[in-house]
Amino acid sequence: MGKQTSDARSAEKRAIKHCSHWIGGKPWDGEAERHGDIYDPATGQVTGQVDFAAPAEVDLAVSAAADAFREWSRVSLAKRATVLFAFRELVRTHADELASLITSEHGKVAADAAGEVARGLEVVEFACGIPHLLKGGYSENVSTNVDSYSIRQPVGVVAGITPFNFPAMVPMWMFPLAIACGNTFVLKPSEKDPSASLLLASLWAEAGLPDGVFNVVHGDKVAVDAVARHPGIAAVSFVGSTPIARYVYETGTSHGKRVQALGGAKNHMVVLPDADLDLAADMAVSAGFGSAGERCMAISAVVAVDPIGDDLVGRIRERISGLRVGPGTDERAEMGPLVTGPHRDRVASYLDSGVREGATLAVDGRAHPVIGGAAEGFWLGPSVLDHVTPSMSCYTDEIFGPVLSVLRAPSYSSAVDLVNSNPYGNGVAIFTCDGGAARRFVSEVQAGMVGVNVPIPVPMAYYSFGGWKASLFGDTHVHGTEGIHFYTRGKVVTSRWLDPSHGGINLGFPVNA
Ligand code: NAD
C-alpha cells in the first residue's frame, strides 16, 4: 500500500515539472519539506512544483558560494570576461527557450518576454567590459618617491532576491556585474516563475563558470529571512514591493550587510495641453497595458493638464477597444493574463473601489474579449478610471495591473506638485512640445528615472536603474557604475619605492597567460 502511494506520487510528480535549487554547479538532490505550485496563468492550471528552501538549504548555497569565492575573486579579469562572453552567447542562442519559459509561468506575450531577455542581455554585455569598468586611478609622486592608486575589490558572497514580473531581466540586472566584479552569487527568484533562473544557471555552467559561483535557492519568506540574516552573505540586492523592500533593507542592514532594495512604484505621465495627443494616447496605452501593467515602470497614473482631459481619455478609449488580449503563446495577443488568480481579483477590486470613491469607470476591462483563452485563465482586460483624485485607494495603492487612472490638473505646477506629493519616485514622464517646460520638469520632479515624450524611461545598462523615496531603500541604484560600486569595495594604496628595479630581460610579446 505504502509502495503504491509513493509510486502514485512519483507518477504525479512526473506529470508536472519540478523546480529545485541549483547549488555548487548542479541541481540540488535533496527532498524539500515545503513546496509551492507553479501556474500557467493563461489556463489557470498548476503546471509544476517548486521546492521551498529551509535555512539549511540556504546555508548549503552560501557555503558553496563562499568556497568558490576564494578562487573566483582571484581569477584574472581577462578570464572572467571570457566566461561572460561565453555566457552572453549562450543566453543569446537560448533566448527563445528562455522567453517561452517566462510566458508559460508569468503569462506575458512572447514578444514581451523576448524583450525582457534582450534587456537583461544588455547588462551581460556591459559586464563583459569588466576589465575597463574596474580600472582605478593612479597618481605618481604624490610625495617624493610616493605613488597613490585606487583599486576596487569584490565584497564576497552576495545575494539577489527578485520579483515575479521580470524573472530573467531583474536577476540579470544583478548577477552579471556581481560575478564580473569577482563575487559569488546566491539568487532567490520569485517562487511564482522559478524556471528561467534554472536555465540561466545551467547556461553559466556551460559557459565555464566554476561551480558555486552562481547558485539558486527557491522559496518564500523563510528563504528570504535566511538570506537577509545569513552571516556569510556580505551584500543583498532586492527588487520587489515596497513593504518587502523596506523589510529586507532593515533586516539585512541590521545584520551588517550592504543592501540595495528597490521597491514599488506609481509612475505618472504628465500630459501638457500642447502635447501631441495622439502620441500621448499611444504611449499611455503601451506603457499602461504592456505586460498587463505588471511592470515596475508601467504608467499607472495619467495627469492630464486642463483642458485636454476629455480629449485624451477619448483617444485612449478608442485605442483600447482594438487591443487583443489572449494567451502569451498566441501570436495575435498583445496583452496576456495576470500572474495569479488572487492578484487578478485584487486588481479588479480597484475598479469597484474607484467607482465607490467617486471615479468614473471609462473602460471596464472585465468586459474585454479574450481571444483563444481558457475560461480558467487569470484574465482582466485593460481598464481606465477617470476623474481619479489623490485620496482614492486606486491612486494611493500600487495596483500593479492593467488599470490606468486619469487625474486632472489645472496647471503645470499643480501637476508637478501632485507627482512630488506621491510617496513613490520610480519613473515619471512628461509629454509636451515645449522644450523649456520639459527641461524645467526634469529638474523639478522627484523621481529616479524621467522620460520626455518617452513613457517608460528604463535606463540602458551603462546607466543605473532605480527610484527615489519609497521606491528605493539604500544608496545605490542597480547596474551601470552604481552597480560596480555596490558590488565592490574601494581601497587606496599609497606606496614608496626608493630604488628603481626591473624584472630582467624578456623578449616575448606581453600576453595575458
Ligand atoms: P514581492 O515583494 O511580493 O516579492 C519580491 C520577492 O520578495 C520575492 O522573491 C518573494 O518571494 C519575496 N517575498 C514576498 N513576500 C515576502 C515576505 N513577506 N517576506 C520576505 N520575502 C517576501 O513582489 P512581487 O509581487 O514579486 O513583484 C511585484 C512588485 O515588485 C511590485 O511592487 C513592483 O513595483 C516591484 N518591482 C519593482 C521594481 C523596481 O525596479 N523598483 C522592478 C520590478 C518589480
Image (spheres, grey):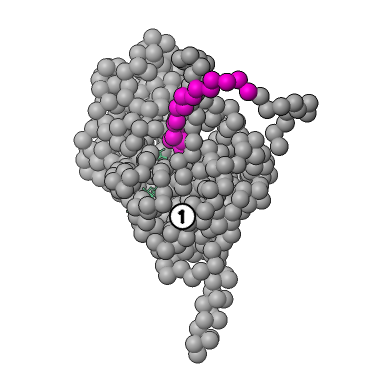
Within the image, what quadrant is residue 428 found in?
A: top left
- Amino acid type assigned to the residue bearing label 1 in the image: Val
In the image, what residue occupies the spot 52% across and 48% down?
A: 69
Nearest the viewer among 492 and 153 is 492
In the image, what residue occupies the spot 21% across and 35% down?
A: 391
Helix, strand or loop at disc 1?
helix
Q: Is residue 16 visible?
A: yes
The C terminus appears in which quarter of the rendering?
Answer: top right
In the image, what residue occupies the spot 36% across and 44% down?
A: 257
Nearest the viewer among 12 and 365 is 12
Q: From the image, tell me which residue sits under label 1.
A: 62
Nearest the viewer among 353 and 19 is 19
Q: In this rendering, is residue 355 above or below 144?
A: below
Residue 380 appears at what percent x and percent y?
Answer: 42, 48
Q: In this rendering, is residue 409 above or below 125?
A: above
The residue at the far front in this view is 499
Q: In this rendering, is residue 468 above or below 207?
A: above
Q: Is residue 240 magenta?
A: no
Residue 498 appears at what percent x and percent y?
Answer: 54, 20
Q: Is residue 486 magenta?
A: yes
Ligand 1 neighbours mark 1 (CB distance < 8 Å): no
Residue 471 relative to residue 461: left or right:
left
Report the number of numbered marks.
1
Residue 73 appears at what percent x and percent y?
Answer: 54, 42
Residue 213 appears at what percent x and percent y?
Answer: 55, 49
In the image, what residue occupies the spot 63% across and 23% down?
A: 501
Q: Which residues are magenta?
A: 482-501
Residue 85 relative to residue 244: left or right:
right
Q: Is residue 224 visible?
A: no
